[in-house]
Image (tube, rainbow, N blue to C red):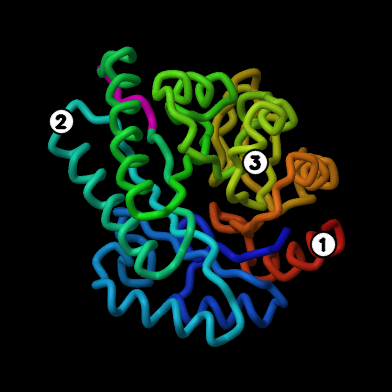
Amino acid sequence: MRIGLLLSVTGLKVQDFLEGARLALSMGLQCGRAGRDLAGEFPCADLGTWDAEAAVVLAQSIRELGLDISALQVHVDYVFADGRERERRLDHTRRMIDLAHAMAVGVVHTVSGPLPPGLDEAKAWDDLAEAYDALCSHACAAGVSPAIEPVFVYLVGTLSTTKRLAEAMGRDDLYINFDPSHFPYHREDPEGFLEAFGPRIVHAHAKDARIIPLQIGSPLPANSFYMGNEEAFTFAPPGAGVLDWPAVVKGLQATGFDGVVSLELGHGIPDEVGAARDTARSLQALI
């Protein structure tokens, strides 16, 4: 198992990917992980718009530093009433899969997105299964492993909804980017997910979650989400939340996982760089 650093709007924000790779190297990490979505908030240029030659040069430059690129991240939604918008997102993801192939990156990981207001849930699930079937076929042809990250409040965000998508697709080549920090929102234990989907996990995130008691009528703290029962959910560095990270690491190892655990320390976590350095040291000790 190796430790990496996520460079993304949801991870560590840097001005360019090579700068981020040097920062990962300074922390003693072994891998970098590039990410991009369509939000336009990340300082780095959208990797999905790069031509293959430029992307290959970037990959070579990062590897010359002694680092690897463990995955590309595509965080866009795939469930829309407007089929044209869904196809635009699918085209973007296919483009990232093609870039991953050119860059010799083995994993492209995605998220389902939420259920849009007013859209029939049964149709949403049909559309999602169809979208992922198309992405898996494209990735298979490119020699890339497509993965989904279950995300709280998204259509696929729990053990049961991950099982629902897997059953709807009827194929076993959609893999998992495992982020245990999402499960506390739904009051789930990540151990059950590891038992059910351990063999499909090809990548993981290192992030924790805090549960904040609320006074009735009080406003939500910044970067938090209401859970009901006068509680709020927010992300935190590993070891600063409710997760048992030694148990998470042991659980991953028990599945046979020998991939990359990538530090994802955006989401309003203070002092991202300091938190990444501290987490890198603590995870290295655990592993």
Q: Is residue 83 left or right of residue 115?
A: left
Q: Amino acid at mark 1?
A: Ser
Mark 2 and mark 1: Cα distance apart in space: 45 Å
Measured as percent of width and height from the top left, residue 77 is found at: 33, 39
- Circle 2: element type: loop
Measured as percent of width and height from the top left, residue 34 is found at: 46, 65
Q: Quadrant of residue 278?
A: bottom right
Q: Quadrant of the C terminus?
A: bottom right
Q: Amino acid at mark 2?
A: Asp
The crowding category of the residue bearing disc 1, from other C-alpha atoms within 10 Å (few below 14, some 14 to 19, many at least 20), is some
| Residue at x-position 67% and y-position 36% | 198
Give the magenta-colored segment's residue range: 114-118
150 in relation to 177, above or below: above
| Residue at x-position 63% and y-position 61% | 270
21 in relation to 154, above or below: below
Q: Is residue 15 left or right of residue 221?
A: left
Q: Quadrant of residue 49?
A: bottom left
Q: Is residue 101 left or right of residue 67?
A: left
Q: Quadrant of the N terminus?
A: bottom right
Q: Amino acid at mark 3?
A: Ser
Q: Which sits in the foreground, 41 or 163?
A: 163
Q: Was residue 253 drawn as part of the magenta stretch in this picture?
A: no
Location of mark 3 (residue): 181
Location of mark 1 (residue): 282
The crowding category of the residue bearing disc 2, from other C-alpha atoms within 10 Å (few below 14, some 14 to 19, many at least 20), is few
Q: Was residue 117 drawn as part of the magenta stretch in this picture?
A: yes
Location of mark 2 (residue): 82
